[in-house]
Amino acid sequence: MRKIIYLNFLLLILLTTTGKLGFSQTDTTVLIYDTTDYINNMIPTSKVDSLKKNTMSLLFIGDIMGHGPQIRSAYDAKTKTYDYDTVFSYLKNIMSEPDFTIANLEVTLAGPVYKGYPQFSSPDALAEAGKNAGIDLFVTANNHCVDRRLQGLNRTIDVLDTLHILHTGTFKNKEARDISNLIILEKDSIKIGILNYTYGTNGIPVPKPSVVNVIDTAVIHADIDSSKKNSLDKLIIVLHFGSEYQSHPNKAQTDLVSYLFEKGADIIIGSHPHVIQKMMYLPGNDSIKEHFVAYSLGNFVSNQRKTRTDGGVMTRIVLKKENDKTFIDTSNYILTWVYKKPRTNGLYYYFILPAAEYENKKSFFKNPTDYEKMKLYIKNSRTLLNKENLKVTEFIKSVN
């Protein structure tokens, strides 16, 4: 179902005095109410009818990157604007279906000059296209968040506020962090919280007075304890951690996950390695809480083309509440692959594909080599995840 998000009275829309209209995220509680109250008639009746009470569906997607070839290919010389909508077009129905879709924005929106690696700044249109496709929340604490120093960090926040996209992980100052560090999402009787941290910022000092949530067990422990006053049903922590291009979590990752579960986290979602790593659902019982971890979701979109870096996974989790107890009802994943289709003059179309839906559609691909590369990605991913996942299986859409 396509969600309708109403910000409650704590999330005020403010006009800034920066010379243009802007918005300020001044608190972090978001409610979803019955969409029949929505007067603009933008929701198909069939989707309204499919709403389920006392459930919350979540979709987590991996690294949204902005390398140079992506930026150049998104530029329209006729209109002198950038457009990324087609990038997400093959997944829009999947991304817009859950109640909340959360993504890792691994670029800054620092304005021109737009560049990719090593110090990223992508056009605002990238975030706008993500929102158009269904993304509700960007986590922004990652090793590239201060690539463009204070101006880049602050402008990224301003752009996301202007687009009405929730965010956490980076903040203009300590006061802003105190207010909006914990994102609270609510639907029906279910309330969850989201926190976000990164291992570092590529050695670039965090410019004052801004704050970046850097992984520090004492700080995270304090944030977990602070979140308990909100009576959350589940606490989700999104971590930017691990070793790049390694398909298996390292000891630092597994140790940190165990520690955070012990301190009160319920679900942990990882990013940074740019390849996928295992996912585990750990059932609970009367004395032990259930837990879920996805160590790395890989690349959602990028220009990286080496083996295993050319795709990622989307993790789907459905929470359900019965008898005042909230639990993970289902958890699975969808393989995605970035189809880099040649155009002219060294430009490309970048399409993120739901891989399983196209693994038997060879004629869809202009170049048979691309089809074989996607098939290899699917094979490698399934070999890894079928062996190492625990109670998290692939979701494959049935074809009638």
Image: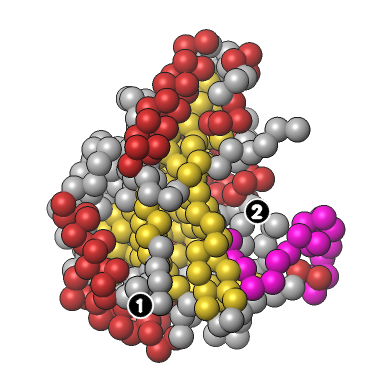
Q: Which residue is mark 2?
A: 97
Q: Position of residue 80 (x, y in %)?
A: 57, 36
Of callouts 2 and 1, which one flags the residue occurring earlier in the amino acid sequence? 2
Scheme of image coloration: secondary structure
Helix, strand or loop at disc 1? loop
Count of all numbered marks drawn on residues in the image: 2
Q: Which residue is mark 1?
A: 287
Any part of residue 43 in sight: no
Closer-to-camera residue (344/240): 240
The residue positioned 42% from the left and 32% from the top of the image is 382
Structural distance between the alpha carbons of marks 2 and 1: 34 Å
Helix, strand or loop at disc 2? loop
Type of amino acid under label 2: Glu
Q: Position of residue 108 (x, y in %)?
A: 37, 52
Any part of residue 317 in sight: yes
Q: Quadrant of residue 37?
A: bottom right
Q: Residue furthest front?
A: 286
Q: Position of residue 208 (x, y in %)?
A: 22, 70
Viewed as shown, does residue 242 lie left or right of 24?
left
Q: Residue furthest bottom?
A: 229
Residue stretch rendered in magenta on the structure = 37-57
Closer-to-camera residue (221/366): 221
Vertical comparison of 89 with 34: above or below? above
Q: Position of residue 126 (x, y in %)?
A: 51, 46
